[in-house]
Image (cartoon, grey):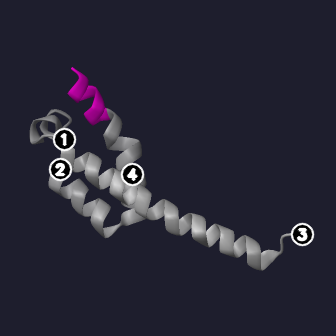
């Protein structure tokens, strides 16, 4: 049977794996879009990169949920 210490270890490992993956995904995605795409959606590329860097978990989640889709739509046009 799995006890509390084992569950804590599993959750910790998952969190420690998820945060870097989200951070790198958001940062690479933000950097690969040209400045013109950012201008079309009225967002500032530098500000979002700084948000992702200084608030890795929250910034990555916000970027991936709010901005990435808009940039992808602009890029596909």
In three-dimensional space, the C-alpha distance between marks 1 and 3, rounded to whole angstroms, equals: 48 Å
- Which dot, 4 or 3, sits closer to the camera? 3
Q: Secondary structure at mark 4?
A: helix
Residue identifier under label 2: 45
- Which dot, 4 or 1, sits closer to the camera? 1
In three-dimensional space, the C-alpha distance between marks 4 and 1, rounded to whole angstroms, equals: 17 Å
Residue identifier under label 1: 33
Q: In the figure, residue 66 lies in which quadrant?
A: top left
Q: Secondary structure at mark 2?
A: helix
Residue identifier under label 3: 1
Give me the disc on residue 62.
Answer: 4
Q: Secondary structure at mark 3?
A: loop
Q: Quadrant of the N terminus?
A: bottom right
Residue 15, percent from left and from top: 55, 66
Residue occupying image coordinates x 42% and y 55%: 22
Among numbered discs 4 and 3, the one appearing first in the sequence:
3
Q: Residue furthest front?
A: 1
Give me the disc on residue 5.
Answer: none
Q: Is residue 32 left or right of residue 20?
A: left
Among numbered discs 1 and 3, the one appearing first in the sequence:
3
What segment carries the magenta color?
70-77
- Which dot, 2 or 1, sits closer to the camera? 1
Residue 73: say if magenta: yes
Among numbered discs 4 and 1, the one appearing first in the sequence:
1
Q: Quadrant of the C terminus?
A: top left
């Amino acid at each position: 049977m799995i006890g509390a210490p084992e569950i804590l270890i599993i959750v910790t490992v998952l969190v420690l794996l998820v945060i870097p993956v989200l951070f790198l995904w958001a940062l690479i995605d933000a950097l690969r879009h040209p400045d013109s795409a950012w201008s079309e959606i009225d967002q500032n590329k530098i500000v979002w990169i700084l948000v992702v860097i200084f608030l890795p978990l929250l910034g990555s989640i916000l970027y991936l949920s709010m901005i990435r889709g808009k940039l992808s739509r602009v890029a596909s046009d």
